[in-house]
Amino acid sequence: MSDAGSIRIDAVTHGSRGWPVAAPSAQPTTSTFDREWDPLLACTAGFVLTAVGRVHELFPALNVVRPAIVTGLLSIILFMLDGQRVRRWRSISTGTTIWLVALLGWSVVSIPAALSAGHSFDFVTGEYVKTVGMALIVACAVRGARDLERLAAVVFWAAALYAAVVLVRFDVGEGSDWRLGRLYYYDANDFATFAVASMPIGLYLARRARSWIGRAVPVAALIVISAAFVRSGSRGGFLALVVTALFIVLSLRAISIGKRIAAVAVVALVVMVAATDRYWNAMGTILSDTDYNQTAESGRLQIWQRGVGYVMQNPILGVGADNFRAAEGRLSPMAMRQQYGVGVRWNAPHDTFLQVAAELGLPGLVFFVLMMIGAFRDLHPRRRTWPGGPRGAPVPPALKQALRASLLGFVVGSLFLSLAYTALLYTLVGLAIATSKLERRYRRSLAAVA
């Protein structure tokens, strides 16, 4: 291949099992076309900063230039003008992409049957299409492992910046004000999941650095994120943190066990120092039978029970994208009270998978689950399949495993939140698709010289 997206293989022979093996004097390497940033990658990173990190809301002065619109449009234009093969649509034609597009397509199909078809139409065409489109552009924009690392780092630094602003501008008090309330765009629970999903990437960046300063900066950012995480007071976030920490210690084998334990210990130490008695008391109520989530009409348990009812009533097309709240106000047993002048709370589903099932029906849930499985599979570590071992892999195994841990943290947190359409999820899915793209191209290059 002669285009800028080609991959160069040096001195390849074949082992006893047929796998390409690098000759002792050479290692297979990717070409250096992604050594530097380029305009498309920069604009894509800018969009991630605005869509995920909400940087324009942290610093309202940026809204003068409308960064979300500018970076998004420039990304699309630059992508359409880019002629590199590694950035063509065909390069991301994977199972994960197919299910992602199918999910978007089904959300469009469900619009006519939605409880509020106008709202569903506005949401799908105004928000969801942009989110899915940018996920695909994230996947296409990546030219090599350096680009993948850069965009992953943007997610981490966006979380660190957001956390720093939260610590500076928001405070907690006593009584019912012991935890953060609604922040910029996110609420406290959403931010906790964002924080947990970013932490494995920070661990990778600290491990990847070659100087003590390069390691100290990501570690300091992890401390800031952890401190803000505690102030969120999120119980679902706490469970996500525990699961992610266990996954990091037990599964991130591309990083030494000592470094894994040290990183988890740093976060745990910050949590223990920053957490108050009120925080630990709240964490202790997660399984309590008297907690409002199990007893209250607007608690998660009863919302989930009603949500299952919406799925049974509308199993194919659901109630429409972003229409779960409308179902609470129109279909729930509580809705009849409104005719007597009694207000009814239009609750969010508080579970991402139930949200998809209720709003897009069982076919939508199938597409969503298959997309998630595909993303995890794209990030699954593969051993001894690359010339030169892990060092010869087109994507560093540690980066793949860190992204996998990030996606796991998001999934666990999303079990208690309504995050089916959030930009963070689709950015992580886009990075997973990009990982698969790089590995498939590398395999084809190996096969070409076999």
Image: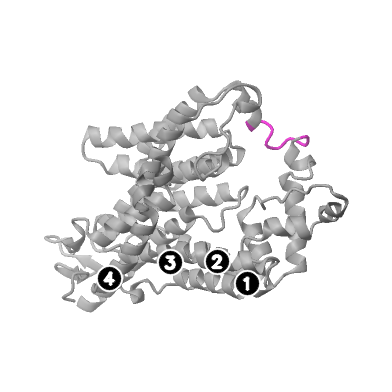
Helix, strand or loop at mark 3: helix
The disc at residue 86 is: 4
4 vs 3, front mark:
3
Residue bearing mark 1: 111
Task: Kindly report the secondary structure that dominates the magenta region of the rendered protein.
Answer: loop
The disc at residue 133 is: 3
Q: CA distance from mark 2 to mark 1?
A: 8 Å
199 sits to left or right of 45? right
Residue bearing mark 2: 124
Q: Pointer 2 and pointer 1: residues touching (CB < 8 Å)?
A: yes
* Outermost residue to the left: 25
234 sits to left or right of 266? right
Amino acid type of the residue that numbered disc 3 sits on in the rendered structure:
Gly
Please report whichever mark, 3 or 1, sits nearer to the chain's N-terminal start: 1
Measured as percent of width and height from the top left, residue 245 is found at: 48, 40
* Outermost residue to the front: 64
Residue located 38% across and 38% down the image: 161
Q: CA distance from mark 1 to mark 4?
A: 35 Å
| Span colored in magenta | 283-290
Q: CA distance from mark 4 to mark 3?
A: 17 Å
Q: Pointer 3 and pointer 1: residues touching (CB < 8 Å)?
A: no
Image height of 254 relative to 228, above or below: below
